[in-house]
Image (cartoon, helix red, strand yellow):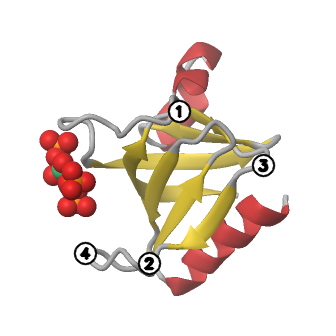
Amino acid sequence: KKGYVMRKSCIDPNGKKTPFGKRGWKMFYCTLRDMVLYLHKDEHGFRKSALSDNLHNAIRIHHALATKASDYNKKQHVFRLETADQAEYLFQTSDSKELQSWIDTINFV
Ligand code: I3P
């Protein structure tokens, strides 16, 4: 699965709250492959970027959980992703169908 999403980082992989200044929403071209969610700047970056760049913004989804962020009311179609290394992110998708599709893909790969 692939597509554009907005991402907000809430808790870093060390389990600590993402510091102010790094908590904003950012757009990424997101691809899911081999239990890894890769976040690219855009589709072009997805094709062009070096493996090291891809790994930099990669989120391993083994033992991760995606759920609708029904407690987050500032934006629509948002899911929360909690990872095995205790990171937490919010992802905004384009509509309710995309929302469910990302959640199912992440939870049931
Ligand atoms: C954050 C940015 C986010 C906001 C977050 C801010 O500032 O404005 O949009 O989250 O609030 O800290 P920065 O870009 O300087 O990190 P919301 O959009 O959810 O309000 P937060 O600290 O309450 O998460």
Q: CA distance from mark 1 to mark 4?
A: 24 Å
Observer-side mark, 4 or 3, equals 3
Label 3 beta carbon within 8 A of ligand 1? no
* Residue type indicated by callout 1: Pro
Label 4 beta carbon within 8 A of ligand 1? yes
Q: Which residue is mark 1?
A: 13
Residue 73: x and y, percent? Answer: 30, 79
Residue 24: x and y, percent? Answer: 24, 47
Q: Is residue 3 left or right of residue 16?
A: right
Callout 4 crowding tier (Cα within 10 Å): few <14, some 14–19, many ≥20: few
Q: Secondary structure at mark 1?
A: loop
The mark that comes first in sequence, 2 or 3, is: 3
Q: Secondary structure at mark 3?
A: loop
**Residue drawn where x is 82% and y is 40% of the image:** 34
Q: Which residue is mark 4?
A: 74
**Residue drawn where x is 64% and y is 46% of the image:** 83
Q: Secondary structure at mark 2?
A: loop
* Residue type indicated by callout 3: His
Indicate which disc residue 63 carries: 3
Labels 4 and 3 touching (C-beta < 8 A)? no
Labels 1 and 4 touching (C-beta < 8 A)? no
Labels 2 and 1 touching (C-beta < 8 A)? no
Callout 2 crowding tier (Cα within 10 Å): few <14, some 14–19, many ≥20: some
Q: CA distance from mark 2 to mark 3?
A: 23 Å
Between 25 and 32, the one nearer to me in the picture:
25
Q: Is residue 27 left or right of residue 49?
A: left
The mark that comes first in sequence, 4 or 3, is: 3
